[in-house]
Amino acid sequence: MDQETFSAVDAFIGETLTPPDEALQAALDAAQAAGLPQIQVSPPQGILLELLARLQGASTVLEFGTLGGYSTILLARALPEDGRLITLEADAEYAEVARGSIERAGLGNVVDIRVGPALETLSVLGEEGAGPFDLTFIDADKVNTPNYFSWALDHSRPGSLIVADNVVRDGSLADAASADPTTKAQRRFHEMLAAEPRVRATTIQTVGAKGYDGFTIALVGEG
Ligand code: SAH
Ligand code: DHB
Ligand code: MG
């Protein structure tokens, strides 16, 4: 098994299960034209996010890391008309690209993009009394995953779902001796989950067009 096979299978899944999608394609094209890094979730992963939001019956979503709005559009589509998705992006140029794509997708009224380092924006959201969020997707700077998780947990309700991307990173998650701050953060995130009576969580390893990685899903309970 190699990367070529993983990509070929993702391509097959995309061709068979993913109908042509004008708004999503336009979002990818706009991101590429603007020179954004192509690190959005893969199409199958994006649809998983949409399915989770639908299964969840979510009407409030918090996203860390907007990039060009690809995952944002999929999550926002799962929401009812009066739903609301707040997405946090540090880079003002990325946020502008995302804003255009989200508006073209007809989701401008549902999505609220907040520009700035997420930890700073969280203070503002806290003051605004934002939340509770039915679903949180953590996909920004990976060293802060534990901090974003803590905040998300405190702004959840019993039944909320918290999803974190890129937790496995080529298997580095299993390396207890790693000095890499990102890896250490993902390991700490898992230790937090294990010690947290309010959540039941699991991590699923994935292969695909984006290589070998994985995501965590945590269901918030009464604790
Ligand atoms: N969720 C997107 C991909 C996000 S990539 C998708 O799947 O379509 C990660 C994003 O997090 C990048 O756009 C990056 O600029 C942003 N980011 C990095 N550090 C951040 C921070 N401190 N606060 C908010 N966003 C940050
Ligand atoms: C990368 C991948 C991601 O899914 C992400 O959210 C951020 C960065 C990467 O491959 O560098
Ligand atoms: Mg990611």
Image: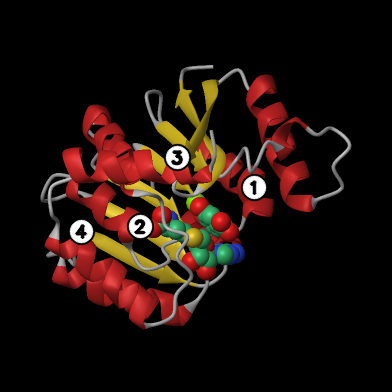
Please tell me which of labels 3 and 1 falls first in the chain: 3
On screen, residue 175 above or below 22: above
Residue pointed to by mark 2:
86
Please tell me which of labels 1 and 2 falls first in the chain: 2
Residue pointed to by mark 4:
110
Please tell me which of labels 4 and 1 falls first in the chain: 4
The percent position of residue 96, horizontal first and vertical second, equals: 35, 80
Cβ–Cβ under 8 Å for marks 3 and 1: no
- Mark 3: secondary structure: helix
Q: Quadrant of residue 149?
A: top right
Report the disc number at residue 147. Answer: 1
Please tell me which of labels 4 and 2 falls first in the chain: 2
Report the disc number at residue 5. Answer: 3
Residue at the image point whose x is 74% and y is 44% from the top: 183
Amino acid type, residue under disc 4 in the picture: Val
Alpha carbon distance from label 2 to label 3: 36 Å
Alpha carbon distance from label 4 to label 2: 9 Å
On screen, residue 91 above or below 185: below
Q: Quadrant of ligand 2?
A: bottom right
The percent position of residue 152, horizontal first and vertical second, equals: 51, 42
Cβ–Cβ under 8 Å for marks 1 and 2: no
Residue at the image point whose x is 22% and y is 61% from the top: 24
Report the disc number at residue 95. Answer: none
